[in-house]
């Protein structure tokens, strides 16, 4: 059964919220700014990507329900976001002319997932504000093992 990756609607909010909560995360911003991965049977995950400049994007969050992870749905969703990030930003300005970057901050075990999907470690000062400082004052910083990451194309 094929999966679709599309912008979320109000009808997706409850299921996506429960997927985020099951991973100790929360929806950020408007549901319509998120993208979801789904099929006829339901919604399996989602993410939120911002376009910060013509050639710069930041992946704020991505999550897939536990049983979807074993089927590669997280990688399928992330690869779609990395290959055409402008297509998954609600307020996308324009498609980059040639090269572009996608940054994110990994937390805990997600670092290996991002690395497996082509992102590389970078310094936090390579991230755009406020993301460059987002971990500095976090009370969970030591346990989180956060890492700044970048995908460049």
Image: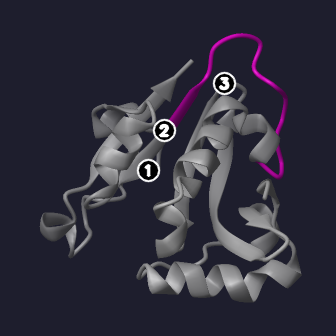
Q: Residue at x 77, y 36 (%)?
A: 86
Q: Which quadrant of the structure image shows residue 3?
A: bottom right
Q: Residues within 10 Å of mark 3 (few under 14, many from 20)?
A: many
Does 112 sit left or right of 98 as displayed? left
Q: Residues within 10 Å of mark 1 (few under 14, many from 20)?
A: some
Q: Is 128 rendered above or below residue 46?
A: above
Q: Is 39 rendered above or below residue 15?
A: above
Q: Which residue is mark 1?
A: 131
Q: Residue at x 78, y 59 (%)?
A: 1
Q: Give the residue at the far top of this rendering.
A: 98
| Helix, strand or loop: magenta stretch | loop
Q: Are marks 1 and 2 in contact (CB under 8 Å)?
A: yes
Q: Residue at x 31, y 48 (%)?
A: 111
Q: Position of residue 114 (x, y in %)?
A: 40, 43
Q: Earlier in the sequence, mark 1 or mark 3?
A: 3
Q: Earlier in the sequence, mark 1 or mark 2?
A: 2
Q: Which residue is mark 2?
A: 103
The C terminus appears in which quarter of the rendering? top right
Does 2 sit left or right of 99 as displayed? right
Which portion, as a residue range, is magenta? 89-102
Q: Position of residue 21 (x, y in %)?
A: 50, 86
Q: Is 96 rendered above or below residue 69?
A: above
Q: Which residue is mark 3?
A: 55
Q: Alpha carbon of mark 1 to alpha carbon of mark 3: how far?
A: 17 Å
Q: Are marks 3 and 2 in contact (CB under 8 Å)?
A: no
* Residue 34 appearing in the image: no
Magenta region includes residue 109: no
């Amino acid at each position: 059964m094929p999966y679709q990756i599309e912008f979320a609607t109000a009808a997706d909010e409850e299921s996506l919220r429960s997927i985020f909560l099951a991973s100790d995360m929360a929806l950020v911003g408007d549901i319509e700014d998120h993208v979801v991965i789904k099929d006829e049977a339901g919604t399996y995950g989602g993410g939120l990507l911002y376009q910060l400049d013509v050639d710069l994007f930041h992946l704020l969050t991505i999550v897939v329900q536990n049983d979807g992870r074993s089927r590669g749905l997280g990688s399928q969703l992330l690869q779609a976001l990395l290959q055409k990030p402008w297509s998954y930003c609600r307020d996308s300005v324009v498609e980059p002319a040639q090269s572009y970057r996608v940054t994110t901050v990994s937390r805990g075990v997600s670092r290996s997932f991002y690395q497996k999907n082509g992102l590389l470690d970078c310094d936090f000062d390579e991230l755009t504000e406020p993301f460059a400082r987002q971990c500095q004052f976090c009370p969970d910083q030591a346990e989180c093992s956060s890492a700044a990451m970048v995908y460049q194309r």
